[in-house]
Amino acid sequence: MTSRTACTLALAASAGLARAQVVADGSFEASGPMLPAPGIWVGESTHFDTPLCDPASFGPGLPSAARTGQWWAWFGGVDIAPSSSSLEQVVSIPSGPASLRFYLHADSDRPTPTDFFRVRIDSTPVFTIFNTQLGGFRDSYIPVTIDISAYAGASRTLRFECQTSGGGYLTSFFLDDVSIEPVGQHPCYANCDNSTGTPLLTANDFQCFITRYNNNDPYANCDQSTTFPLLTPNDLQCFVNKYVAGCP
Ligand SMILES: [Ca+2]
C-alpha cells in the first residue's frame, strides 16, 4: 500500500466517523476522490468507472451539480447505448422507526417509461421512479423520505441503481446527501422546536415549521404523502390540526 493510498483511506475513515451516521459518506465527498478504487460506496457503471462525479471529472456543460460539496452521483446520462449503474454500501440500521432520506434531481427527453431509478434494501425495492414521472425533480434536488422501519435492527445493503435504454434518448438521475435517520425525535409532532417549557406549544413552533417547510425538510411532510411534490399546503393544514390538537 502506498502512503498516498493509506492517507486517502485515513481521510475517508475520519470523514465517516465525524458524521457518526448510519450511512457513511452520504454526500460522496470521501468516496469520490478515491476513484477508480472502491470507496465507502461501491459503484458499478456500464460506461464509466463509477456513477460518482465532480465538476473536474466531466468538464463544462454539466447538466447538474452537487447539492452539497463537490461530488454527487450521476446515473444514466448516456443516449447512444443502454446503461446500467449502481452504488451500494452495507448499513447497520438501529432498531426502531427509521427513515431513509436522499436528494434526487433528474431529467429525461424519453417519452416512454423505460428508464428508471430504484432504491433497494437488500433485494427489496423500496422506491422506484420512471423517466416519465419526474415532475419537480426536473427543476432541482428534492428530498425523498422513505419509511424503512421494517428493515431496522439489522445490517442491510442499501443500493441505488438505474437502468436506461439509450436509443438516442437521454435520461439522467442525480443523487446526493443520503442519510438514514431515526424517526420519533419529535414525540409530539407539533412541538417543532423541541421546547420543554410551559406552554409546550408556542408561536415558535409555527415559525419552526415554516422554516423547515421552506427548507424542504422531510419533517414538514406532515401528511406523510408520497407523491411529488412531497410538501404542499396540505402539510401546513396538517400541522395546524396537530397544533390545535395539542400535546399529551
Ligand atoms: Ca455531495
Image (tube, rainbow, N blue to C red):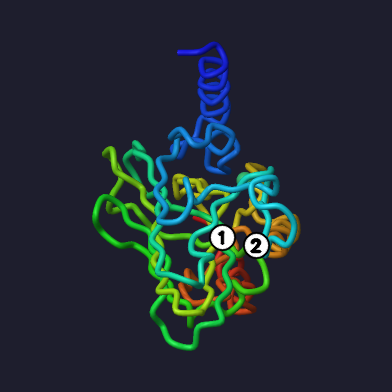
Above or below for 129 versus 66? below
Residue 82: where, in percent of width, then height? Answer: 40, 69
Decide: few, some or many residues near mark 2? Use Cα within 10 Å; few <14, some 14-19, many ≥20: some
Residue 94 placement, left or right of 11:
left
Q: Nearer the viewer, mark 2 or mark 1?
A: 1
Above or below for 13 versus 127? above
SS of the residue under disc 1: strand
Residue 194 visible? The answer is: no
Q: Quadrant of the N terminus?
A: top left
Residue 203: where, in percent of width, then height? Answer: 75, 59
Quadrant of the rendered image containing residue 33:
top right
In three-dimensional space, the C-alpha distance between marks 2 and 1, rounded to whole angstroms, equals 17 Å
Above or below for 131 versus 21? below
On residue 174, the disc is 1
Report the front residue among 158 and 73: 73
* Residue at the spot 38% in from the left edge and 63% down from the top edge: 118
Above or below for 150 versus 242? above
* Kind of residue indicated by mark 1: Phe
Report the front residue among 132 and 224: 132
SS of the residue under disc 2: loop
* Kind of residue indicated by mark 2: Asn
* Residue at the spot 26% in from the left edge and 39% down from the top edge: 154
Decide: few, some or many residues near mark 1? Use Cα within 10 Å; few <14, some 14-19, many ≥20: many
* Residue at the spot 42% in from the left edge and 53% down from the top edge: 45
* Residue at the spot 44% in from the left edge and 45% down from the top edge: 182
- Which residue lies under the disc numbered 2? 216
Residue 217 visible? The answer is: yes
